[in-house]
Image (cartoon, rainbow, N blue to C red):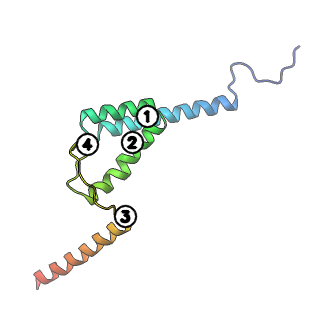
Amino acid sequence: MIATTAPGPLIPTGLEILLQAVGVALVVLVIVAVISLLRSPLDSQRRLIWVATIFVLPLVGPAVWLWWRYWYYPRRRQEQPDWDPNDRTKRVNLARKSFRDLQRTSDDELKRGDAVRREQIR
């Protein structure tokens, strides 16, 4: 009888399980990014560039796309409602406001709107 201390060849080691989990997480991240990209407001040419970025850089590409789609894009639209990500003409970007400044501005506008409505009711 031969005594072996290593696991059998069919039983995965802890490192193999970890690598498989990381691989599955990467595949899920890429799938989520591609689905999000397909639902985005971008035209087909820009989508093609993003798809290439997502597949060529499998960790960085999806992370950058998801950051742009769910963090940068909504804030930019809030600052500049007429901004279109497909517009290829050069525009000068306005000075960026912090989220607190935007929130404070919207709170002030709401208070002013309430005051105007109260005056209209009287």
As helix, strand or loop, the secondary structure at mark 2 comes to helix
Q: Tag 3's secondary structure?
A: helix
The residue under label 1 is 30
Answer yes or no: do the residues labelled 1 and 2 have beta carbons within 8 Å? no
Of badges 1 and 2, the one in the foreground is: 2
Element carrying mark 4 = loop
Residue matched to label 3 = 99
Q: Amino acid at mark 2?
A: Trp
Tell me which residue sits at (65%, 28%) in the image: 16
User: Which residue is label 2 attached to?
Assistant: 65
Task: Report, in whole angstroms, how far the alpha carbon at label 1 lies from the one at label 2.
Answer: 10 Å
Label at residue 12: none
> Percent x, y for residue 24?
52, 32
Between marks 1 and 3 in the image, the one whose residue lies nearer the viewer: 3
Disc 1/disc 3 C-alpha distance (Å): 29 Å
Q: Are marks 3 and 4 in contact (CB under 8 Å)?
A: no
Residues marked 1 and 4 touching at CB (< 8 Å):
no
